């Protein structure tokens, strides 16, 4: 029985997703199983994305004053 994706750590979800991608890339999986693997992979991908978004929201950037000394923190802005 599959572990629900919400119970997986980021690392567990990513490892399982990599396994699924490998199986699908081989191209020898029966259609019904490929569909099921794709659906599971999509859930795992979303789990990983959610975990990364949560981690990014927790990262703070240190603001420096004119003298280059720490003056506080602000939320991290990617990009």
Image (cartoon, helix red, strand yellow):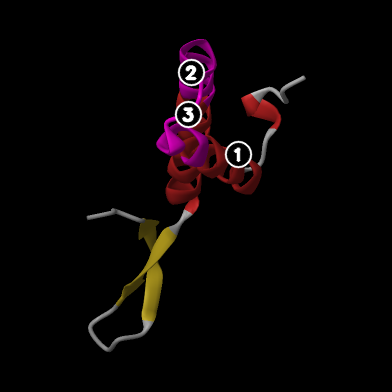
Name which residue lies at 52% across and 23% down: 37
Q: Residues within 10 Å of mark 1 (few under 14, many from 20)?
A: some
**Does the magenta segment cover residue 34?**
yes
* Discs 2, 3 touching: Cβ within 8 Å: no
Q: Is residue 77 above or below residue 13?
A: below
Name which residue lies at 59% across and 46% down: 15
Residue that sits furthest to the top in the current view: 32
**Does the magenta segment cover residue 65?**
no
The answer to which image quadrant residue 73 occupies is bottom left
The tag on residue 31 is none
- In the image, 9 versus 55, the foreground residue is 9
Quadrant location, the N terminus: top right
The residue to which callout 1 is attached is 16
Q: Is residue 76 above or below residue 46?
A: below
The residue to which callout 3 is attached is 28
- In the image, 79 versus 42, the foreground residue is 42
| First in residue order: circle 1 vs circle 3 | 1
The tag on residue 39 is 2
């Amino acid at each position: 029985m599959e572990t629900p994706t919400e119970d997986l750590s980021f690392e567990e979800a990513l490892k399982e997703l990599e396994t699924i991608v490998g199986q699908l890339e081989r191209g020898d999986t029966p259609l019904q199983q490929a569909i099921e693997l794709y659906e599971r992979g999509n859930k795992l991908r979303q789990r990983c994305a959610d975990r990364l978004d949560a981690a990014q929201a927790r990262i703070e950037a240190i603001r420096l004053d004119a003298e280059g000394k720490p003056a506080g923190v602000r939320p991290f802005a990617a990009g």
